[in-house]
Image: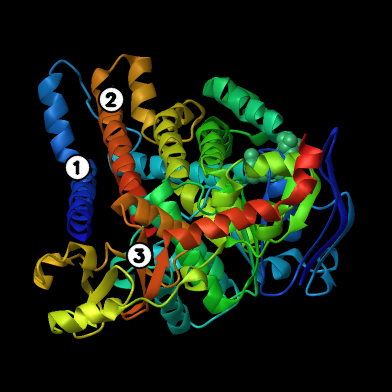
Amino acid sequence: MKHPTRIRWAVIAVALVGFALLVSAEGMWRDLLGALFPDYRTVVHPRGTLVDFTLEHLALVGVSSALTIAVGVPLGIWVTRRSGREFRPLVSAGVDLGQTFPPVAVLALAMPVLGFGFWPTIVALFLYGLFPVVSGTIAGIESVPPAVTEAAVGMGMSRWQVLARVELPLAARVIMAGVRTSVAINIGTATVGAAIGTGGLGVPIIGGLAVQNMAYVLQGAIPAALLAVLADALLAQAEEGLGVATG
Amino acid sequence: MIRLENVTKRFSEKTAVDGLTLEVPEGEVCVLIGPSGCGKTTTLRMVNRLIEPTSGRILVNGRDVMSMRPEELRRGLGYVIQSIGLFPHLTVAENIGVVPRLLGWEKPRIADRARELLSLVGLEPDSYLRAYPRQLSGGEAQRVGVARALAADPPVLLMDEPFGAVDPLNRERLQAEFGRIQRELHKTVVFVTHDIDEAIRLADRVAIMRDGRLQQYDTPENVLNRPANKFVHDFVGADRALKRLVRIKVTEVMRPAPQAAIDDAPEAMRERAGAGRFVYLTDDEGRLAGWLDTDDIRDDAVADAITTVDRLQATVARDASLRDALSRMLGLGFRSIAVTDDEGRIMGEVTFAAIEAVMSEAEEHRGPTADGEGA
Ligand SMILES: Nc1ncnc2c1ncn2[C@@H]1O[C@H](COP(=O)(O)OP(=O)(O)OP(=O)(O)O)[C@@H](O)[C@H]1O
Ligand SMILES: [Mg+2]
C-alpha cells in the first residue's frame, strides 16, 4: 500500500511544478497563441501576467473553499446531532437554494453591500460551494451504521468522543468527496469574479469574450482547467491518505 | 449485584417493559428470554442507561444507575450489542482497546490485554490483532465483540443475543466457550436470547418474559420441570426431558468402567470384564485405544474380538452434557460411551440405561402443576 501511494504523490508534485513552469512561461504563451491566431494584434491579456492571474485565482478559491469547509462541515455535523436535528430540513433547503442561485446574481446582490472586488466574489463562491460540503457531511455521518454508534455510546464514550473517534473517521471519505466537488465548482465559478474586478483567470476569459479575442479566452481557460484537474488529484490523494489512516 | 425494582418503560403508546422486578446475584448468569418484542433489549438497555425507565429503580452494586454519570456507569458494564457493532475503521486490537483507552490505560498494558483476551476467546492473537472487522467471519466477529466487552475486566456483562449471527454449529462452540470463560471469570451476566436451548445451557437463572411482563424467574431445572404457567410450559416446548439432559454433566451419572491395557495378556483382559460384556482397552498413557467384546470371543481367540477405535470420536470429555453423550452414542450406534479427563484418560462410562433413567425421572418430577394449568 505504501509504495504506490508514494509514487502517486511524486507524480502530483511533478505535475504541480510543471503547472508552475507553464504559467510563468510568458514567451511560450505569446508564441503559441500568436501561431494559432496570426490575425490578432495581441494574444496575451495586457492587464497582468498569467502568474498574477493564477495567484489571484488561487487566493479566491483558497479563501472561499476554506470558509466553505469551516462552515459546511460543522453545519452538517450539527444537524445530525440531537440538538440540531430539527434544523436539518431548513439547512438542507438553504444550502440547496444557495446552489440554485446563479453566482452572477449573488454578485449583483452582494455588491451593494460589500462593494467591488474580492469579498462579494468570496460570498458568491462560498454560497455556491456550500451544498456539496454540507450534504457530503450529512451523508457521511448517516452512513455510519447505527450499531456502531450504539456500541460506542454503550461502551462509555462521551458524545464528543463518539463524534471524534467513530463518526468523523468513518465519514471522512464521503466528506472529502463533498469537498472535492465543492473545490472543483469553485475553481470554475471563480472566473465570474472578473466581472466585478476581482481578478483571477476570469480576467482574460471575460475580457476575451468581450472583445472577441479567442486567444485571451484560451490563455485563461487552459490554466483554469488544468488547475481544476490538479486540485482534484491532490484532494483525491489526500482522501486516500485518510482512507489508509482509518482502514 | 443487579436489581430491577418494579421497572416500567413506556414508549408513547406501547409498554415495552411492565413492572419488572428481578435480582441477579453476583457471579450468576441471568438469561432473559421470550418472543420477539417482549422487551428483552429494552430491559438490557435500561441497565446501562441507553434507555431511561419510565418508573421504577435499577441498582447496580447497590447504586441507582440514575444517580451515576452515564459514561462512568457504562465503562463498568461490558456490553455486547445485538448486531456486534465492531468499529470498522479500527483493527481488532484497537477495537478491544477502546474501553481501556477511555479509562486511560498505558499503551503496553492495552496491547497485552488485547492478546490475552483474543486467546481467551479462542482466536490466535498473532493472526487477528492487526485484522480489520471486515476480514472476520461472523463467528470471529462475535468473539471479538465478547473480547471487547471483557477488555477492562468489568464485573458485569450485558450481552444482547451475542451469538445470534452464527450458524448452529459455531453457536454451540461459542456457548461452550462462554461457559468455560464464565467458570473462570465469574462475571455477573445478563444475557439475552430467544433460543431456549441456549438459555438452558448457559443460565444459572432464566427470566421468561412476555409482553414486557416477567412470567417465571427460576433455575433452568425448575423452568423445565415446574413451568409456572401455560405460556412457560408451551414456550419451553414438548421435549423438556431431552432439554434437561443439557444441564447434567456426564460425570454425574458416570459409573466405573472395566479397563485393561491393550498389550495385556488376553486372559487378563477377559478377567477384567468380570460379569460384563465389554472391556475398554487403553494405550500406555491410559487413553482409549479400543475395546474387547467378550461376546465375540470364539475358541479363545481373544485378539479377534478386539476393536480399535479413534479415541476422539468414541469418547466424550468430562465436561460434556448428557445430551452431548446421547447424541454421540446415537450417532455411533453405541449403548455406552467412555468419559475422559483433560489428559484423555478414561474416567468411566455413561450408559444408555443411565440416561433413560434420568429422562423418566424428569417426567415424574414434572408433576401435575403444568398439566393442570396446561389443560
Ligand atoms: N425506541 C423505541 N420506540 C418505540 N418503541 C420501541 C422502541 N424500542 C423498542 N420499542 C418497542 O418495545 C417493544 C420491546 O422491544 P425490544 O427491542 O425490547 O424487544 P426484544 O424482546 O429485544 O425483541 P427481539 O427479540 O426482536 O430483539 C417492541 O414492541 C418494540 O417495538
Ligand atoms: Mg432485542
Nearer to the camera, B175 or B300: B300
Tell me the CA gap for discs 1 and 3: 86 Å
Disc 1: CA contacts within 10 A as few (<14), some (14-19) or many (>=20): some
Give the CA distance from mark 3 to mark 2.
95 Å
Residue A74 spot, x, y in % from top left: 61, 47
Q: Which residue is mark 3?
A: B337
Same chain under badges 3 and 2? The reply is: no
Mark 2 or mark 1, whichever is nearer to me: 1
Amino acid type, callout 3: Ile
Looking at the image, which residue is at 65% across and 35% down?
A: A114
The residue identified by callout 1 is: A22
Q: Nearer the viewer, residue A63 or A46?
A: A63
Crowding around mark 2 (Cα neighbors within 10 Å: few <14, some 14 to 19, many 20+) is: many
Q: Quadrant of residue B351?
A: bottom left
Residue type beneath disc 2: Tyr
The residue where tag 2 is placed is: A216
Under mark 1, the amino acid is: Leu
